[in-house]
Image (tube, grey):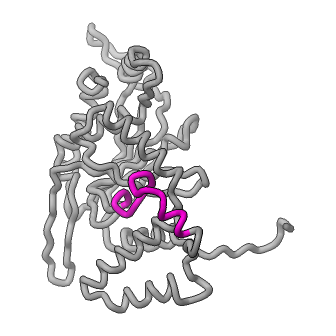
Amino acid sequence: MPRNRTLVSRFGIQRKIVANMTTESWQNIPHVSYIFEPDLTVFEEKFEAFRKTLPEGVRVTLNMVILKAIAESLKAAPEMNAHIHFERMLVRGKITRFPNIDMSMPWILPSGDMMTITMKDMGNRSLRDIAEYMNEMSKKIQNTNLDEVMYDVSIKDTMQELKKGKVLRVVMRLWGAKVNPRHRVATLHGAEKKAYESIPEQSRLTYLDLKQGTITVSNIGSITRGQNGEIAMLMIIPPQICAIGISALQKKPRVVTLPDGTEEIRAAKVLPMCICFDHRALDFGNIKPFADRLQELFNDPEEILKY
């Protein structure tokens, strides 16, 4: 194909959902972004020592432990684990805090596409549970047709819009997804659909695995290892009020206070994190307990380094 040829590709179901959610987010949510850079120098050393004690064949990654630390730290700032409902015309709203921490987490699929999966009840899972859960999700992804599960999500979300009385929006969505031939979403039919549906639901992703979480945690660092950049802003998925972006672990100079009170500059392992929150629901004071608790766990990780 000639390089100078103009190419036009129409949105698939995954890109339609992302585009719709992104537009709603940036039109309605006053985003505030805070860059937090905890020092993981001691933590990484203790993690490497911990990994050597694991039974043969057991795989626990740095990412899994970081997720465990984030879940534990959210318990110190429960205001972050919530949804908001705000009616601007009537100037009224409410915030719903949840006892369970259900993390919406973007995953990169083997095809290169992205799918946001909800990791349920992360606050009550041990490190062993988290490792097994994530490995289970990886296996489910292998058996999942992205278009089928995303179409199922879009239909259920559309029905929710209909229940809210948003008839015009529902009609336009259905026109764009199934009626208009130029933008129709391609889904499985006939023998292919029957074969896919014969896969047990517990062995593939379903709507329940993609259902809205209570907070989003996005590990950008997993695809940017070796880079010195960091994420400075990310989208809050409504009605959530907070999103956390994890960049790649990297070396940075840090001022260290010695026992005698003097200071020196050392190379430290730093984990840049972006904490993005909805200013209608949260202030910086709501974020501080989370950041304090997270740094505390990174300084002394014995509490979470238990398999």
- Answer above or below: position of 46 versus 188: above
Residue at the far top in the pictured view: 260
Q: Is residue 100 left or right of residue 45?
A: left
Q: Is residue 304 left or right of residue 26?
A: left
Between 255 and 300, which is closer to the camera in this rendering?
Answer: 300
At horizontal 40% and vertical 48% (from top left) the residue drawn is 245
- Please check the rendered image and state whether residue 189 is part of the magenta-colored stretch, yes or no: no
- Answer above or below: position of 231 versus 301: below
Q: Is the magenta stretch mostly helix, strand or loop?
A: helix
- Quarter of the image with the C terminus in it: top left
Between 211 and 297, which is closer to the camera in this rendering?
Answer: 211
- Quarter of the image with the N terminus in it: bottom right
Q: From the top left corner, tell me how far across and down residue 255 is, in percent.
A: 37, 23
Let me know if residue 37 appears in the view: no
Q: Is residue 278 left or right of residue 139?
A: left
At horizontal 43% and vertical 51% (from top left) the residue drawn is 203
Q: Quadrant of residue 21?
A: bottom left
Q: How many marks?
A: 0
- Please check the rendered image and state whether residue 194 is part of the magenta-colored stretch, yes or no: yes
Highlighted range, magenta? 193-210
At horizontal 37% and vertical 36% (from top left) the residue drawn is 132
Q: In which quarter of the image is residue 188?
A: bottom right
Q: In which quarter of the image is residue 180?
A: bottom right
Q: From the top left corner, tell me how far across and down residue 143 is, in percent.
A: 52, 53
Let me know if residue 115 appears in the view: yes
Between 3 and 167, which is closer to the camera in this rendering?
Answer: 167
At horizontal 21% and vertical 66% (from top left) the residue drawn is 84
